[in-house]
Image (spheres, grey):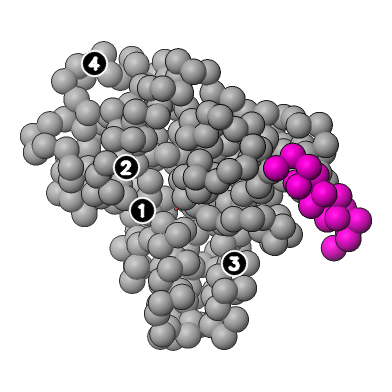
């Protein structure tokens, strides 16, 4: 690793009173320089509690927006504006408004992987870790629209027995994991536990021992005695799993489960963002207040 580059990043971090946040799917070198590594909501919540003036968010675009929603008093820098989330881009506020008009008496549950404007149009937000609890909190008999991830919504519907109207969005990286990948790895690694993310398709979820969010996977790996775990999510998480559990073996269910935009942010991008104090992501106050209300309703429940 380039010591000069790292030295300069650290110097600027101090000068700007900045913290660097990295999502669990980021490149290893980005995770290594981060003050915090985690899932999108835990990172934004930690940032809001910190006394930093500047947050450098290394993840995908909706995550930087979430940080802006929760930290309006801070400058949120997003080092590479090309790092979008294809799942979040499968819904717009306008298309959701049209759907709401067709179903006037409904509750909209919106997965955190969505644009800020969609959060603002929703009644309550959820993450992959708490989606079941959020749906269970809605009174029985009430119509529920779940956006934008079809597979997560389908999993929640199966687990809660609730009928959800599902949006046809999906994560292009998670749907690359196939049932045959799990079966093949189980054959090679007899006795290994299988943990998968709920953005995976139903056939994959059906073969899993554990269905967990990224933070759930990290907690499970630390707490369990399992020596070998097959991991069905974006492969960036393998770096942190191995770093935190050097004696355990983590087997990616599929090397194809890679999110290209999650890998766009480089150390140089982080340095330039701190030098230029740009690109900045700031959600308009009107959208922020409504999106924040949807996030706060979730936080009251979980
Ligand atoms: O919310 C997140 O960070 C994502 C994308 C998934 C997860 O399970 O942590």
Q: Earlier in the sequence, mark 4 or mark 3?
A: 4
- The answer for how far apart the CA atoms under marks 1 and 2 are is 12 Å
For the record, the magenta segment spans 1-17
Q: In the rendering, which numbered label is found on residue 102?
A: 4
Q: Position of residue 267 (x, y in %)?
A: 79, 50
- The answer for how far apart the CA atoms under marks 2 and 3 are is 26 Å
Say which residue label 3 marks.
240
Which is in the foreground here, disc 1 or disc 2?
Answer: 2
Say which residue label 1 marks.
129
Say which residue label 2 marks.
299
Q: Note whether ligand 1 is within 8 Å of mark 1.
A: yes
Position of residue 2 relative to residue 50, above or below, is below
Q: Residues within 10 Å of mark 2 (few under 14, many from 20)?
A: some
Which is in the foreground here, disc 4 or disc 2?
Answer: 2
* Residue 13 drawn in magenta: yes
Q: Is residue 131 left or right of residue 260?
A: left
Query: Element under label 1?
Result: loop
């Amino acid at each position: 690793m380039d010591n000069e580059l790292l030295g300069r990043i650290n110097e600027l971090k101090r000068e700007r009173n900045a913290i660097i946040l990295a999502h669990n799917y980021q490149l290893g070198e980005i995770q290594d320089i981060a003050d915090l590594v985690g899932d999108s909501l835990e990172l934004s919540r930690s940032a809001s509690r910190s006394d930093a003036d500047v947050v450098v968010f290394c993840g995908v675009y909706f995550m930087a927006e979430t940080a802006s929603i929760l930290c309006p008093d801070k400058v949120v820098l997003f080092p590479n504006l090309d790092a979008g989330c294809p799942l979040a881009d499968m819904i717009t506020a306008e298309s959701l408004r049209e759907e709401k008009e067709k179903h006037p008496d409904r509750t909209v549950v919106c997965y955190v992987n969505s644009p800020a404007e969609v959060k603002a149009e929703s009644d309550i937000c959820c993450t992959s870790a708490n989606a079941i609890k959020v749906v269970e909190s809605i009174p029985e008999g009430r119509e529920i629209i779940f956006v934008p991830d079809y597979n997560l919504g389908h999993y929640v519907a199966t687990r809660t027995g609730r009928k959800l109207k599902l949006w046809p969005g999906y994560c292009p990286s998670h749907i690359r994991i196939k049932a045959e990948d799990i079966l093949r790895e189980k054959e090679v690694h007899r006795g290994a536990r299988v943990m998968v993310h709920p953005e995976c398709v139903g056939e994959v979820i059906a073969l899993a021992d554990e269905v967990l969010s990224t933070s759930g996977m990290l907690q499970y790996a630390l707490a369990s005695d399992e020596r070998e775990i097959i991991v069905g999510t974006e492969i960036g998480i393998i770096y942190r799993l191995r770093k935190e559990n050097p004696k355990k073996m983590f087997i990616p269910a599929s090397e194809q489960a890679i999110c290209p935009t999650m890998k766009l942010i480089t150390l140089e991008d982080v340095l330039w963002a701190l030098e230029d104090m740009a690109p900045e992501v700031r959600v308009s106050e009107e959208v922020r207040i409504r999106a924040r209300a949807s996030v706060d309703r979730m936080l009251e429940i979980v």
